[in-house]
Image: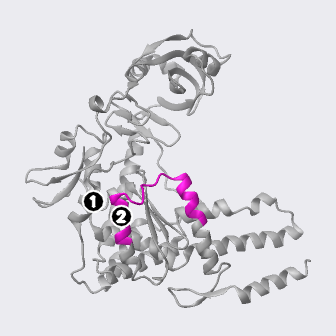
């Protein structure tokens, strides 16, 4: 068996070569086109199960599909059936699966300022498909597995180390590597020019991505978080500044024709869609958090930074070790809020549990001395808000010595927890349009919105329109605002 294994590798080398649709050169891959399409279908099924997708018949999905099909038709693999879907969340991302399944997150769509920019992003993802980057990724992963198998003849390797399907899926979604990303940029420029769009739009969307990266880092630093440049296993996208420089050079080499831009067309397609998270996920509105689907809300005092994560609602007092976390527990049996809290805190030393009613919710509260994230010796206010089979667990904590300093904030946050009424409490932030007028400024628009996007509303409104706060559009220009 050990002697026959190298013969298998030799056989693979002779039988697993294919012509790349983009380069037209022969390349070694371990997947036929039939297998590539099957892998894409399987991966798309998993995405539909695990990610919130706008319906295929949604007007914005139909619009994205129309633009995508226009670009795909002039690509190097026009014979594939391409499918374009929108992931309904605030993430700034897009990704491609093998065989033509392409996804763009609503958060990235919101920051598009022309149809040409949308075509550029979709063209980039189409480039991943046409150049068979997923197949190349798969081949690299499988090569690692084969290498591990050869090594394991002499040095035992745990079987789990060879299970790379999850790693491959993560790599596909987060990027195919620096060279592949730059090639996809180049293919996007070629495809959108062929489709009649202005290829210089690529520069605009890359500048927006860089601006959003910088703004996120500034927000995190302002909140007191340590900001480090990511150097993990999937740090595969080239630095945005480098991509901008290369896009400028490539675009300058293309003949500038009267390519379509479609500024107002793109903006009008976004009207009414949520700016951030959807009503199903809850949304931050200034210093409030609304959850229309679960029908509750609460408010944070000034100075608190709110972060709506998929697993919990988190917040912290700016630049201080003072934290908040809200999680939801679905109950399997009926019990009171008081009994549930007693069960949760168990044997820990605590003040007596108090209980009552608030806005139709059963409540229970206690103060616990325990270890919490970021604070090893913490004092924590723990609250339960219970209605039906849903229990909301609120924990607010800080170092024990500081506890008296922020007890009032903790009490105010807990007291603000109540049911949600859309007529009384308003909607999640949504995209609206405004004609820029002489004398307008991003700061003035932010104030007029009630600082709907928090401390950095002005910067976020400018970034939403592909600008910095120091830049202003010409009077009469249609822009996006958030209401």
Rendering coords of residue 186 (x, y %): 41, 79
Query: In terms of image quadrants, where is residue 139?
Result: bottom right
- 44 is within the stretch colored magenta: yes
Q: From the viewer's side, name the closer residue of 87 and 379.
A: 87
Q: Is residue 32 shown above or below 172?
A: below
Q: Secondary structure at mark 1?
A: helix
Between the residue at mark 1 and the residue at mark 2, the CA separation in whole angstroms equals 10 Å
Mark 1 surroundings: few (<14), some (14-19) or many (≥20) residues within 10 A: some
Residue picked out by circle 1: 269
Q: Which residue occupies 45% across, 82% down?
A: 78
Rendering coords of residue 123 (x, y %): 40, 74
Considering only order in the chain, which callout, 2 or 1, is on the residue closer to the N terminus?
A: 2
- Magenta-drawn segment: 42-68
Q: Is residue 234 visible?
A: no
Rendering coords of residue 235 (x, y %): 53, 62
Q: Relative to residue 469, is residue 418 drawn left or right?
A: right
Rendering coords of residue 158 (x, y %): 81, 59
- 160 is within the stretch colored magenta: no
């Amino acid at each position: 068996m050990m002697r026959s294994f190298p013969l298998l590798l030799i056989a693979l080398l002779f039988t697993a070569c294919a012509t790349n649709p983009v380069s037209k050169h022969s390349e070694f891959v371990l997947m036929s086109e039939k297998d590539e399409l099957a892998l894409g279908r399987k991966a798309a099924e998993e995405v539909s199960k695990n990610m919130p997708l706008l319906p295929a018949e949604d007007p914005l999905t139909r619009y994205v599909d129309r633009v995508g099909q226009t670009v795909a038709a002039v690509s190097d693999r026009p014979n594939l059936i391409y499918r374009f879907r929108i992931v309904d969340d605030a993430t700034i991302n897009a990704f491609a699966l093998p065989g033509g399944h392409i996804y763009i997150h609503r958060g990235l769509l919101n920051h598009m300022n022309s149809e040409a920019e949308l075509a550029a992003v979709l063209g980039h993802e189409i480039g991943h498909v046409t150049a068979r980057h997923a197949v190349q990724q798969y081949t690299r992963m499988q090569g690692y597995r084969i290498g591990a198998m050869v090594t394991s003849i002499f040095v035992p390797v745990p079987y789990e180390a060879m299970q790379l399907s999850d790693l491959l899926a993560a790599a596909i979604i987060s990027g195919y590597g620096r060279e592949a990303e730059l090639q996809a940029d180049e293919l996007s420029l070629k495809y959108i020019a062929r489709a009649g769009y202005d290829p210089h739009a690529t520069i605009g969307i890359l500048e927006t991505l860089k601006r959003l990266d910088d703004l996120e880092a500034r927000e995190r630093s302002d909140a007191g978080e340590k900001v480090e440049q990511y150097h993990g296993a999937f740090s595969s996208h080239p630095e945005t500044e480098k991509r901008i420089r290369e896009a400028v050079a490539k675009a300058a080499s293309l003949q500038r024709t009267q390519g379509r831009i479609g500024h107002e067309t793109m903006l009008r397609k976004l009207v009414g869609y949520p700016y951030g998270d959807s009503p199903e996920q809850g949304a931050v509105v200034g210093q409030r958090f609304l959850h229309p689907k679960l029908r509750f809300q609460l408010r944070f005092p000034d100075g608190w930074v709110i972060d709506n994560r998929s697993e919990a609602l988190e917040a912290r007092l700016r630049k201080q070790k003072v934290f908040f976390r809200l999680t939801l527990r679905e109950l399997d049996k009926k019990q009171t809020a008081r009994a549930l809290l007693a069960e949760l805190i168990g044997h820990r030393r605590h003040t007596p549990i108090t209980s009552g009613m608030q806005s139709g919710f059963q409540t229970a509260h206690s103060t616990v001395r325990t270890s919490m994230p970021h604070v090893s010796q913490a004092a924590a206010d723990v609250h339960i808000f219970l209605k039906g089979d849903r229990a909301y667990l609120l924990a607010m904590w800080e170092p024990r010595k500081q506890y008296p300093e922020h007890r009032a904030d903790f009490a105010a946050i807990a007291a603000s927890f109540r049911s949600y009424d859309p007529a009384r409490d308003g909607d999640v932030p949504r995209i609206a349009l405004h004609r820029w007028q002489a004398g307008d400024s991003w700061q003035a628009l932010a104030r007029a919105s009630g600082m709907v996007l928090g401390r950095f509303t002005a910067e976020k409104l400018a970034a939403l329109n592909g600008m910095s706060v120091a830049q202003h559009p010409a009077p009469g220009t249609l822009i996006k605002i958030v209401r």
